[in-house]
Image (cartoon, coloured by chain):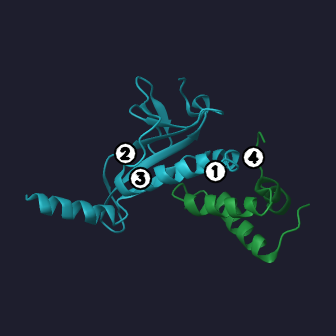
Amino acid sequence: MQILTESQKTILSEIADIELSDDPFFDAKKYRRHIATLESQGIDVVKALKENYDISDDDD
Amino acid sequence: MRISEILSEDRLIESSDYYRLYYSSKYKKALKKVRSQPAVLKKIDQIEDDLKAHGELKNVHSGIHLIANVALPSEYKQADLRGWRSVMLSKKNEIRLVFTLHDEEIDPNTKKPFRVVEIKLGRPSELGYTH
């Protein structure tokens, strides 16, 4: 399990909010920016979403 | 109408959320697949900025083509539609961004006109066409 700082947890929660939303007009730029921020800090976002929010993509 | 008035109207339209980007249901999943490709992400940013501002591509010039003679499914219109444009994002993994500009509508709440730009991301086979 990846250890996240508080600020990383906050960003991940915002990514998760977007993930769980069905809004097709979502803020894609914010979503990408948040993912890039965590990835640049060595966090595997896909793995973190799975570990913390049980969010995964079917064929990943 | 004078040209200055037309330009003025254009500026008003472009600054008032006239173009709304509608992302396909698999857009987020596709974005995660390219999350470690900065060049691809940068190009997606440029494309989205263009589409949001103009409803078409004005600052992105390469790798664009019309998907001719193929109707792709529109989640927004719930129908297969022709006239989509495709932008090559990565030759390596064949990722494309495809988009189409829908007709003008009136927002029932604000009563203001808007147009939806529907966007998909993925490999051609995932998007419903071959190349």
Q: Which mark is residue B38?
A: 1
Q: Quadrant of residue A59?
A: top right
Q: Residues within 10 Å of mark 1 (few under 14, many from 20)?
A: few
Chain letter for the green part: A
The residue singled out by tag 4 in the image is A57
Q: Chain of mark 1?
A: B
Q: In the figure, what tint was chain B given?
A: cyan
The residue singled out by tag 2 in the image is B102
Query: x, y percentage for residue B128?
Result: 55, 29
Single out the mark in the foreground, 3 or 1.
Answer: 1
The answer to whether mark 2 and mark 4 are in CB contact below 8 A is no
Q: Amino acid at mark 4?
A: Asp
* Sequence-first tag of 3 and 2: 3
Q: Residues within 10 Å of mark 3 (few under 14, many from 20)?
A: some
Single out the mark in the foreground, 4 or 3.
Answer: 3
Same-subunit check for callouts 4 and 1: no
Element type where label 2 sits in the image: loop
Q: Is residue B16 left or right of residue A30?
A: left
Q: Which mark is residue B50?
A: 3
Single out the mark in the foreground, 4 or 1.
Answer: 1
Residue at 41% across, 53% down: B50
* Sequence-first tag of 3 and 1: 1
Q: Is residue B20 left or right of residue B110?
A: right
The answer to whether one can see residue A14 in this image is yes
Q: Which mark is residue B62?
A: none
Give the distance between the C-alpha atoms of the residues marked 2 and 1, in whole angstroms: 30 Å
User: Between residues A8 and A14, which one lies in front from this camera angle?
Assistant: A8
